[in-house]
Image (tube, rainbow, N blue to C red):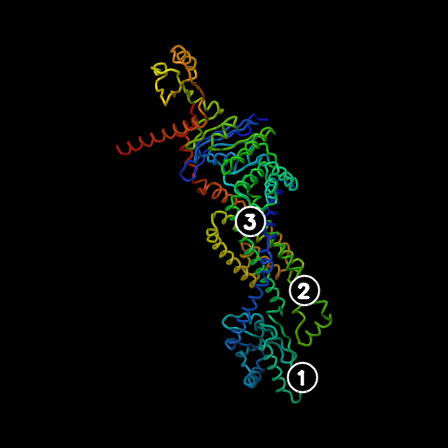
Amino acid sequence: MSDYSVEANGLTKYFGDFKAVDHVSLAVPTGSIYGVLGPNGAGKTTSLRMTLGIIDPDEGTSRVFGERPQSVRHRIGYLPEERGLYPGMKARDAIAFMGALRGLDWSEGRRRAAGFMTELGLERVIDEKIRKMSKGMAQMVQLIGSIVHAPDLIILDEPFSGLDPVNQERLEMLVKRERTRGATILFSTHVMAHAERLCDRIAIIARSQRRFEGTVDEARALLPMQVRYTPRTGGDVAVILPPGAEQRGDAWHFSIEDKAVEPLLSRITASGHGVTGLSIARPALHDAFVHIVRQVDAGFAADARSDAIEEAAA
Amino acid sequence: MSPFAKTMFVIARRDFLSIVATPTFLLFLLAPLFMIAMGALGGAGATQLADSARGAGRLVAVVDAADVEALRSADTRLRKAMGREPATLEIRVAGPDAADPVAITREKGSDTYAVMTGAFANPRIVERDADSNSGRYLALLASDVLRDRAAGAVPPARAHFESLANGGTSIAAQQSMGFGAVFIIFLLTLLLAGQAVGMLAEEKGNKVIEILAAAVPLESVFIGKLLGLLGVAILFIAFWAAMAAGGGLVFASQMDPAAAPAALAAAGKPAIALTAAPASGWPFFITISLCYFILSFLLLGAVFLGVGAQAGTVREIQMLSLPITIFQVGMFSLSTAAASAPGTGLATFAQIFPFSSPLAMAARAASDDAKAVHLLALGWQAIWVALVIWLSVRLFRAGVLSGGGSWKFWRRARPAAAAAAAGAADIT
């Protein structure tokens, strides 16, 4: 068995003249939870659709379990970004229908649907028609529909959007449980907290290209350590701190490289200013994400400026 | 069962139940009653119009040269005595080249209500409508000529009536059956193919289509939808066939078996009116017509799905459906023309052209007893069904799932040119 459930290489897609996805590659280790992060319109959904074989890439290839995605559809569960259910169907039948599409026996699908819905606290709407359910409930029904056949790979496109905090937590629990079962989970989001809590690895896509790939810690390590230091005594504290340290109230805020942590502690101890408060922490994934996206945007803005200058000169 | 077939039937079952298990299906099932009611109303109006227009047409008598004057004077005499003046009588001299009465009724330039040929004692009268005044008037003329010639009392002429409308002649009857088959197939196909597009539009509207596209091959989605609606159509046909059979049984149980032939004999009508059959025989004709209906539906349904899938809204679907409907009406016209002119080049063309082939071949089964040719036609049409579904799926993929982009080959050069400049560099 391959170490990777999903191997997408150089996926590129044009919509008219717009390059929606530009040579994006993804390698999702089997049994992992993998997040595809990116701002709105970055190309996450199109990348996932190409990975699944719903749309053909203009360039690049996608392999799922080492094969064409179309030939292993029954091993995949997919929750699209735009939720879709037949409004006239009952919840239990809608789930069984989605399972049946992937080869699950209809009656077994109905049985499993009842089990999942009870577990997620939705037992009172099992035989309710979709049109009578709230948006969040319908979304949970669709989510169950995408995993009812116990797939080996679960692809969820923005699964948390539209869910209240309670259901978001239920969904996180479900994702973890599916991973424990042995499934590989690939999901997209622009909410960093979920990715930070769930993902083993992430890819950050911005402006149609993949800008980062690695673990959450590796992403956070892109930025220096964030330090918050509150001395016990006043005086010229700034001289022992790195350039750029900023005082807000009693506390000083600055960032330092990993290797500068011990020297800083030595300087503080030796200076005699004392310590009322000291926190040295990695920045959150949110900060790393914003940093990456801003860098990309700054690059685009610079390109646009130089283009404008060249145009004016011409 | 293969996974492809299995998913196809899952979709077919869903679509079938979503139509049948609704109260509106009852309306659909009873639609023929509305159609019959409307037809009856329209027919009554048309009859009134026809009656008021009577006189503009003609009656034709084909007689020996020696009988022309006698017939003309009988016409002059009797015409004035009639409550409503009959249509103009055209008298033709019989000869070796005299046209067949059925052909005379179809001559262009005049509306022919009835044609009389043969001896006055037992003339053959071909009527446009059964039991018409025109037919009776010609029989009356024959009797009058006989009476005029005989010295004493003579029995009235024993006319042999045949009606074009009721299948009085076998060829006319078979052509009528062919036309009927064409009409029924056309009507059902058009009704149901439109529904297929509506369902696809609904799935696009509620975004289910992406789930289907991710889970199963689009070919099985398309074929599944067509099969689901075919199931609806077959249920519809079975319902009305059962109603007709039940009605027939009730009628038969109420009737004296000897009464019908006796009644016909008393009216001087030939038994052919009730015993006319398609050239290929009833069982074959019904079976093959059902097969042609299925293929016609699959063909048109696939076209509707393929083109309709490009639309995003109901309004767009209506806009796109209109040209296809007009095209299908064109195929209907072509097939009816072929049905009334069997063996001609036009008929052959209609039988070969894929979109009119199911209709025209059903008509052919009514007037031609050759059976092997139908196997060939079914195979030919099946190839076209597969081709249209294949093309529709690609259209759908290119136009809908790809976000409405243009055809792929237009874009071939662009990615290649851009590839060198591209390069996804991770930030580290």
Image vertical order of residue B342 relative to residue B98, above or below: above
Give the alpha-carbon distance from disc 1 to disc 3, as whole Å.
63 Å
Q: Amino acid at mark 3?
A: Trp
Give the alpha-carbon distance from disc 2 to disc 3, as whole Å.
38 Å
Q: List the residue tagged with mark 3.
A: B384
Q: Give coordinates of residue B136: x percent, y percent.
A: 60, 78
In front of the other: A115 or B204: A115
Q: In the rendered structure, which disc, 2 or 1, sits on the residue that comes first in sequence?
A: 1
Q: List the residue tagged with mark 2.
A: B247
Question: Within 10 angstroms of label 3, few (less than 14), some, or many (20 or more) residues?
Answer: some
Q: List the residue tagged with mark 1.
A: B155
Q: Give coordinates of residue B37: x percent, y percent.
A: 57, 66
Q: Amino acid at mark 2?
A: Gly
Q: What secondary structure is found at the residue carrying circle 2?
A: helix
Q: What secondary structure is found at the residue carrying circle 3?
A: helix
- Chain to which mark 3 belongs: B
Q: What secondary structure is found at the residue carrying circle 1?
A: loop
Q: Amino acid at mark 1?
A: Pro
Q: Give coordinates of residue A104: x percent, y percent.
A: 63, 39
The numbered dot on residue A232 is none
In front of the other: B41 or A11: B41
Image vertical order of residue B2 relative to residue B153, above or below: above
Q: In the rendered structure, which disc, 2 or 3, sits on the residue that comes first in sequence?
A: 2
Q: Quadrant of the C terminus of chain B?
A: top left
Q: Give coordinates of residue A143: x percent, y percent.
A: 56, 38
